[in-house]
Image: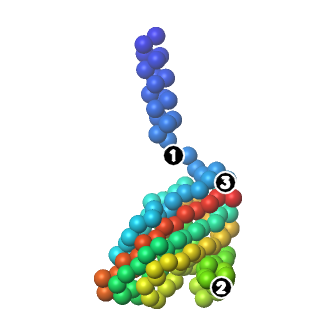
Amino acid sequence: MKKTVRIFILAALALALASFPALAGESFTLHALGAEITVGTGAAVDLGDLRNISIFARVTAGSGTVNPFDVWTECSVNGSTWSECSLDDRVEATTTGAGPHSDNTIKLIAETAVTTSGSYAARVTSLSKFIRARWNIAGSTPSETFEVIVLTK
């Protein structure tokens, strides 16, 4: 009886620690709100069979001389070889309303100066199994505080 109980507990523990793919309606953080000063990459998220997502970025602070400040998403079929995801839409919310951008179909954020606040959104309908955020921040003592969230559909 003790051996059966141990096997059951080990199986339950393994199931609890297992990574499951995303489900429709879930949200995931690709970059938690925080300051970055250079190039970086967020953790990968397993999207499973989902191929339609919305991506949101929010910038809350910036300082220094920043050029560029870019954020994009990368896709992978296997979690080890990555390429840029193509965005179907990219919108930046402004004080005069939201406006679509056609200047870049890959970067969610494509700024050439310090950004102290901003909201960005994009839709992607053709994805690989895995997604992650990637960013590039350069300049003289650059700093950008931002977050990137994915909402599955």
Q: Which residue was labeled with disc 2?
A: 96
Q: In which quarter of the image is residue 85?
A: bottom right
Callout count: 3
- Picture layout, residue 147 above or below residue 50: below
Q: Which residue is drawn at 43% across and 15% down?
A: 3
State how far apart marks 2 and 3 are (Cα): 30 Å
Relative to 8, is 85 on the left or the right?
A: right
Relative to 42, is 20 on the left or the right?
A: right
State how far apart marks 2 and 1 are (Cα): 42 Å
Q: Can residue 15 be seen in this view?
A: yes
- Picture layout, residue 62 above or below residue 16: below
Q: Where is residue 57 in the image (x, y as percent from the top left)?
A: 54, 71
Q: Which residue was labeled with disc 1?
A: 19
Which type of secondary structure does the marked residue at label 3 adopt?
loop
Marks 2 and 3 in Cβ contact (< 8 Å): no
Name the N-terminal-most of marks 1 and 3.
1
